[in-house]
Image (tube, coloured by chain):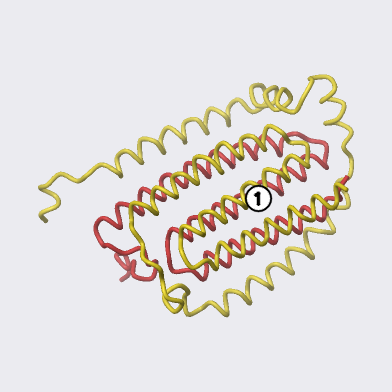
Amino acid sequence: MIPLPLYLILSAALFIIGLVGVLTRRNIVIILMCIEMMLNAVLINLTAFSVNGGNLSGQIFAIFVISISAAEAAVGLSILLVYYRQHRSVKVDEMNLMKW
Amino acid sequence: MTLLTFAILAFLSVLAAIMMITARKIVFSVFWLLLSFFTTACILLLLKAEFLAVVQILVNAGAVIISFLFVVILINLREEPKNERYHQQTKWAVLVSAILFVLVGLLLVPQGRYYTSEGMIASELVKWGGNSELVAKYLFSDYILPFEVVALVLLVAIIGVVVLAKKMPPKQKAE
């Protein structure tokens, strides 16, 4: 039986790496993938607490997290495609349509 | 033995994550993300959450990765030179994230010691026969309302994607 803190450290590390990716990369596709990775870390965290805490609610919410992340990826990618169709660019710092 | 498996999986997962955010080409990034999803599924198997592991492989490693690959094909990206890959604030972002990692570790890891009992799930597993049965029992009794709400969210996402992906009529395009 693996102690719970190891899972927590792993999921925190994955989450932080995803956060670094979101903050540093300029390509929107990579940013969306990093968001997926952060949700993945949350998934590990929820399941580890659920199994070690003796309560199944964490796994149920992990299923909800998976479905919401799939919906998020689909909507985000289609917004990205529409943006690319108009501007021919996927650089996040060139997006300044709503900047005043 | 289990600890060794976990160590290998955790190493692979973190390696894949780091390679994903530093990869030169986006296609490589997608495949590193795929490796990360697979190792996550194996870690879920180690946690004896079999249903979640299968859902992880089907949905994340299957559908989400495929849609990312399709987008990479459609938008036809060239390889980016290094100064175009990262923002200027990279140093600060890494620094702040490292501090955040230490803080999260200090706050979260001591909490982990209080959760060591496996008793309730183990006894219910024996009663219901398996992880999937237990998940189904909770999902369709206690959590039926959130389940329906998530179904609605997915429906809205489908409709939204169809509306977004539709080509604009020529009248609007001319403006």
Label 1 marks which chain's residue? A
Q: Residues within 10 Å of mark 1 (few under 14, many from 20)?
A: many
Image position of A93 (left or right of A47): left
* Tally of numbered discs: 1
Tell me which residue sits at (61%, 74%) in the image: B94
Tell me which residue sits at (74%, 52%) in the image: B9
Location of mark 1 (residue): A42
- Chain A, hue in figure: red
Q: Quadrant of the C terminus of chain B?
A: bottom left
Coordinates of residue B114 in the picture (x, y in percent): 88, 49
Q: Nearer the viewer, residue B68 or A28?
A: B68
Tell me which residue sits at (53%, 41%) in the image: A68
Which three-letter amino acid code belongs to the residue tagged 1?
Val
Q: In this view, does B25 lie above or below B133?
A: below
Image position of A14 (left or right of B166): right
Tell me the quarter of the picture where residue A96 sits.
bottom left
Coordinates of residue B149 in the picture (x, y in percent): 52, 31
Q: Which of A53 and A94 is in front in this view?
A: A94
Q: In this view, does A92 lie above or below B68?
A: below
- Chain B, hue in figure: yellow
Coordinates of residue B66 in the picture (x, y in percent): 46, 44
Secondary structure beneath dot 1 equals helix
Coordinates of residue A43 in the picture (x, y in percent): 66, 46
Tell me the quarter of the picture where residue B51 sits.
top right
Tell me which residue sits at (74%, 55%) in the image: B10
Image position of B20 (left or right of B161): right
